[in-house]
Image (cartoon, rainbow, N blue to C red):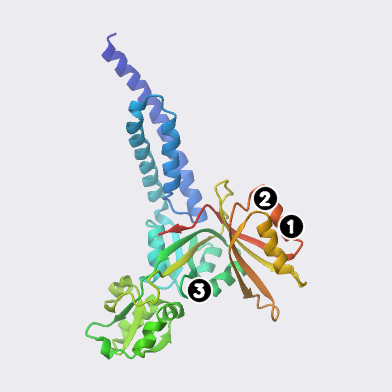
Amino acid sequence: MNDLLKAREIINKTDAEMAKLFEKRMDAARLVASYKKEHGIPIDDFTREDEIIRKNVEDLKNEEYKSYYTSFLRNNIDLSKALQHRLLDGMRVAYSGVKGAFASIAARRIFPDANIVPFADFKAAYNAVDSGECDCALLPIENSFNGDVGKVMDLAFFGNLYINGIYDAEIAQNLLAVKGAALTDIKTVTSHPQALGQCAAYIESKGFETVEAVNTAVAAKEVAEKGDVSLAAIGSVEAAEEFGLKVIEANINQSNVNTTRFAVFSKAQKAASKNDNHFVMLFTVKNAAGSLGRAVSVIGDHGFNLKALKSRPTKELIWDYYFYAEGEGNINSDEGKAMLKELNECCNNIKIVGSFEKEIKI
């Protein structure tokens, strides 16, 4: 047998082995897709993809092949994600609002293959996941300029869902009106209270009256339906396109860095990972002097960085509060378990609603 025939025989045998391994890898990708659907996790994970390539390329002994093997691995990953995208085509993601709302835009960025399902308000979207009607819900928890979304925090405290990721979306607010309207025609603006707050300085400078709406896209829809040149909405460019409005003025929010943080809620809690470095915890403290201060000290003493601590009334007793805390560190580690054990001494209730690797900009 000459060298050419020997080489072809090796290639044929290798290809046959690779076919079996490829099938095995794609079967695993199916399991990954199923897990991500259940936990409301997007398909793209560029950090892990880079880690897979780097680790596997290091195993090669022949330096000459490394660039080729990198391309081979990248192609395998892309094929795996293509399968996952197809399998997740039936995933249902709930949000509050109508098409064109900032939540719908963010949901489409995070879950490009999913069915994005609108609901009338935060509670309805949350309950849709709790009942099994949807796989996950994308709800806002905070705006960089106008603060917390208390109603969503309350759902996290009183509900049963878990947060499996937090995503930062830059928000640009625009003044939207019916075609033919001019800035001088506008007397009243309508939008979600958060959007009105983000644009308060602009609204005051123009002397507009304000009317609150369930969300920005609903406000845009109302303006389109009424056809009143004196009424404008504050919302996204996408909302203007969806309802046939025009942008009278763009980027009217007071802060040039206007970001809303969205949380993905799902029924299943993501499996603990050694890479987790962000957690969301809700707790109430015992009715004793210094309990809150002690709880904060316990968190710090165990090496966890408390990024945010916010209070909300429990609505069960007058002047009774729960606390929403976000921290850096792996709460599932031995140190995290020790921290939780010590917190039980000064807290009545502790609820870990989320643990994940990092916050992601979209």
Number of other residues with Cα within 10 Å of mark 3, as a class: few under 14, some 14 to 19, many 20 or more: few
On the image, the x and y values in percent for residue 100 come to 35, 71
Q: Which of marks 1 and 3 is nearer the N terminus?
A: 3
* Residue annotated with mark 1: 342
Which mark is first along the chain, 1 or 2? 2
Instruction: Give amino acid for label 3.
Output: Gly
Q: Can residue 131 be seen in this view?
A: no
Which residue is found at the position 58% from the left and 46% from the top?
274
Tag 1 near tag 3, CB within 8 Å:
no
Looking at the figure, which quarter contains the C terminus? Answer: bottom left
- C-alpha gap between disc 1 and disc 3: 31 Å
Q: Which amino acid lies under the numbered mark 2 shown in the image of this protein?
A: Glu
Taking depth in this image into account, of 195 and 24 the one nearest to the observer is: 195
Residue for badge 2: 335
Q: Distance between the residues labelled 2 and 3?
A: 31 Å
Name which residue lies at 32% across and 32% down: 68
x, y percentage for residue 70? 36, 35
The residue lying toward the viewer, choosing from 348 and 85, is: 348
Q: Say which label, 2 or 3, has the lower sequence index.
A: 3
Question: Is disc 1 surrounded by few (<14), some (14 to 19) or many (20+) residues within 10 Å?
Answer: some
Q: Is residue 238 visible?
A: yes
Q: Which residue does the numbered mark 3 point to in the structure image? A: 147
Which secondary structure lies at badge 2?
helix
Residue that extends furthest to the left in the rendered view of this protein: 180
Residue appearing at x 27%, y 9% in the figure: 2
Q: In which quarter of the image is the N terminus?
A: top left
